[in-house]
Image: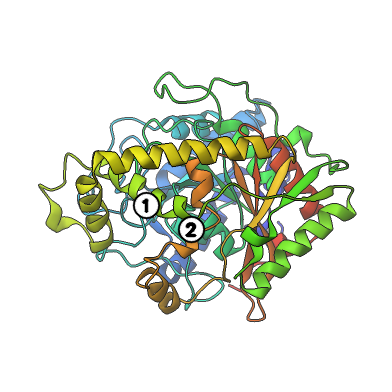
């Protein structure tokens, strides 16, 4: 068996399962052993579903032995963010108010992963209600690269679990950056698909019109394999897009010749930490060396939109918590409680202005894609901060909006975005860079990301655990 089994990519494990070099039972047992050995320190999991995983692994092996291959996720251990419904398994959404909630049915994404033959190892931690901070009752996960540094929000457990080799992929959700932040902080490839590309049925909302569900993996190819299983229309979610779902992985041929990359250097690089700016420029230079073209562009104004994102999120979060807030306000942590209270107090005219600004930005961004195929921006304007540093940012004069500079605007527009590891700080922490695309062009982002990863090794580096 491979010595570093836990750090194989999802695609590598899939190939070994398909040709019989590995069994799902062996891979699953190795993952459960690693969770038992490391998660006491890392704290990624809320619930480890060992019996469920073992049964699914045995079933996968039996089906594979009969030649009944369900696809590339068949027999591969994964984890789910703990706001995604799983029948008979507690789903807390990181909150006290749902601490004992046990769904009677699965979310659509849970069903689709099971149909694809994936093995669910368990449910991983998130910030309270998928907002900015973990509930005071919860011990936050620990960044496997450095215990003193931020893990990202809100899919913190997903990021830690994949980066630490506890699973081969995980589902995250992203309302203002919550797939991309932990992916950047933990050295992963994280995909926020187009809004509606993946059904939200059975997933507890932070803010319905801003929430996106997507994969967090080690490579662009792994993300492509997961997205194929997840995407598509859903009768349970009328907002799920009805567009056909392509075979994303089949299109990963390394060819980016003629791809036009847009960069607004004033937006993407002014005031950005040098190590982050260098990673952006390096990614662009690498893609240009492979045959892509680069074009200077000007994004539609986004500064005010970032503050407006917070107000829009607050209103929709208040709607999501009507059953428990204010009735159980004392059970909420301070960050989520203040967000909901602010949403309940927002005047209708203010919300109307937000919706107008959101539509104007989305229209301007759509027009920009007449000139370019992909936009490049940092994931964060700074390298991964320390826990204390992030606390100071969130409590600073800017009201904590600075980290949202490059992520929240494309939640407002619903645009797909792929975060890639593209460098390291002198202190050995990963740096993420973001590719942004047209609606429903996840395939193009994944092709560019895969081409970049074919000639770089940032995604192959792992924490020493």
346 or 186: nearer the viewer = 346
Mark 1 residue crowding within 10 angstroms, few (<14) / some (14–19) / many (20+): some
- N-terminal label among 2 and 1: 1
Q: Quadrant of the C terminus?
A: bottom right
229 or 78: nearer the viewer = 229
Mark 1, secondary structure of its residue: helix
Residue at 37% across / 59% down in the picture? 132
Spot occupied by residue 326 in the image (x, y as percentages of width and height): 13, 48
Which label is found at residue 464? none
Q: CA distance from mark 2 to mark 1?
A: 10 Å
> Which image quadrant for residue 264?
bottom right
Which label is found at residue 404? 2
Mark 2, secondary structure of its residue: helix
Residue at 63% across / 44% down in the picture? 223
Spot occupied by residue 52 in the image (x, y as percentages of width and height): 42, 42
> Which image quadrant for residue 443?
top right
Residue pushed farthest left?
327
User: Image check: 226 left or right of 84?
Assistant: right
Q: Is residue 330 above or below residue 150?
A: above
31 or 369: nearer the viewer = 369
Label 2 with label 1: CB-CB less than 8 Å: yes
User: Image check: 245 left or right of 104?
Assistant: right
- Asked if residue 74 shows in the view, the reply is no
Residue at 28% across / 36% down in the picture? 103
Mark 2 residue crowding within 10 angstroms, few (<14) / some (14–19) / many (20+): many
Q: Is residue 105 above or below residue 266?
A: above
Spot occupied by residue 41 in the image (x, y as percentages of width and height): 43, 72
114 or 199: nearer the viewer = 199
Find disc 1 in the rendering and name its residue. 310
Residue at 20% across / 46% down in the picture? 344
């Amino acid at each position: 068996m491979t010595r570093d089994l836990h750090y194989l990519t999802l695609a590598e494990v899939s190939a070994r399962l398909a040709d019989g070099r590995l069994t799902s039972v062996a891979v699953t047992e190795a993952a459960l052993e690693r969770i038992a050995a490391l998660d006491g320190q890392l704290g990624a999991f809320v619930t480890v579903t060992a019996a469920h995983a073992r049964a699914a692994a045995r079933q996968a092996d039996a089906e594979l032995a009969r030649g009944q291959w369900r696809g590339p996720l068949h027999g591969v251990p994964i984890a789910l963010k703990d706001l995604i419904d799983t029948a008979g398994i507690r789903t807390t959404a990181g909150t006290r108010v749902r601490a004992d909630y046990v769904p009677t049915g699965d979310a659509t994404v849970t069903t689709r992963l099971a149909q694809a033959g994936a093995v669910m190892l368990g449910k991983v931690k998130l910030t309270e209600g998928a907002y900015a901070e973990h509930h005071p009752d919860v011990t936050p996960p620990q960044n496997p690269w450095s215990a003193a540094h931020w893990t990202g929000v809100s899919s913190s457990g997903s990021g830690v679990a994949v980066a630490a080799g506890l699973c081969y992929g995980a589902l995250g959700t992203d309302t203002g950056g919550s797939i991309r932040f932990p992916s950047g902080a933990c050295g992963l490839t994280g995909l926020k698909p187009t809004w509606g590309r993946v059904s939200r049925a059975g997933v507890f909302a932070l803010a319905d019109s801003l929430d996106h569900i997507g994969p967090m993996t080690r490579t662009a190819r792994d993300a492509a394999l997961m997205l194929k299983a997840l995407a598509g229309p859903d009768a349970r979610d009328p907002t799920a897009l009805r567009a056909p779902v392509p075979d994303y992985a089949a299109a990963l041929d390394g060819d980016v010749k003629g791809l036009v990359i847009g960069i607004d250097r004033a937006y993407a690089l002014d005031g950005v930490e040098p190590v982050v700016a260098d990673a952006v420029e390096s990614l662009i230079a690498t893609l240009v060396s492979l045959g892509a073209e680069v074009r200077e562009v000007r994004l539609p104004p986004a500064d005010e939109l970032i503050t407006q994102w917070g107000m829009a999120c607050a209103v929709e979060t208040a709607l999501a918590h009507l059953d428990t807030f204010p009735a159980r306000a004392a059970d909420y942590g301070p960050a989520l409680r203040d967000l909901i209270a602010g949403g309940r107090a927002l005047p209708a005219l203010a919300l109307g202005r937000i919706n107008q600004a959101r539509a104007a930005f989305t229209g301007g961004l759509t027009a920009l894609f007449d000139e370019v195929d992909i936009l490049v921006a940092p994931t964060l304007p700074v390298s991964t901060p320390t826990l204390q540093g992030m606390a100071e940012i969130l409590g600073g004069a800017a009201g904590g909006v600075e980290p949202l500079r490059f992520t929240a605007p494309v939640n407002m527009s619903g645009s797909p975005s792929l975060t890639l590891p593209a460098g390291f700080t002198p202190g050995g922490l990963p740096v993420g860079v973001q590719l942004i695309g047209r609606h429903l062009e996840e395939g193009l982002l994944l092709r560019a990301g895969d081409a970049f990863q074919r000639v770089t090794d940032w995604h192959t580096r792992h924490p020493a655990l």
